[in-house]
Image (cartoon, grey):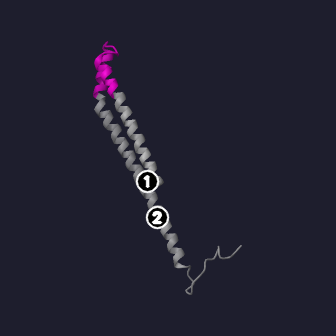
Amino acid sequence: MSSDVFHPHRNVTGHPIPEVVLRTRRSVMEAANELKAQRTRKRRHAGIALLALGTLIVLFAPALMTVANDLSAGEHFFDLPVLVLTFFLVMLSAVFAVLLLKWRERDVDGDQR
């Protein structure tokens, strides 16, 4: 084995070659910046998802309570107000799921670039 692997070439002053040091420093700084950006992106995505979930709960909690009261008062599941609310909840959940999948797909494409 060559001793050059363990001891880099030294210039006249006795320090390692500045190009090697600068290249290593650049690659370490680039990796640190990428990790920081990834952490920030994950936090932002979690915050947006929590905001969307909270908004859905706040918007549909009164309607869900009304449906629960109607069902407990003797109305049937196949009454028009209950069916309409159930249909909208299913559609809203489906749209939210599709948006999350597209969002995740876009993030995966962005990470591969």
Dividing the picture into quadrants, the one containing residue 57 is: top left
> SS at mark 2?
helix
In front of the other: 112 or 11: 112
Locate the N terminus and report the quarter of the image it occupies.
Answer: bottom right
What residue is pinned by disc 2? 30
Residue 15 left/right relative to 3: left
Q: Is residue 84 above or below residue 1?
A: above
Q: Is residue 81 magenta?
A: yes
Indicate the amino acid at tag 1.
Answer: Arg
- The disc placed on residue 39 is 1
Indicate the amino acid at tag 2.
Answer: Glu
Span colored in magenta = 62-88
Q: Is residue 103 above or below residue 19?
A: above
10 Å crowding of disc 1: few (<14), some (14-19), many (20+): few
Tell me which secondary structure the magenta stretch mostly adopts: helix
Q: Position of residue 87 (x, y in %)?
A: 34, 25
Residue 10 left/right relative to 38: right
Q: Earlier in the sequence, mark 1 or mark 2?
A: 2
Q: Which residue: 52% across, 70% down? A: 24
Q: Which residue: 55% across, 86% down? A: 13
Q: Is residue 18 magenta?
A: no
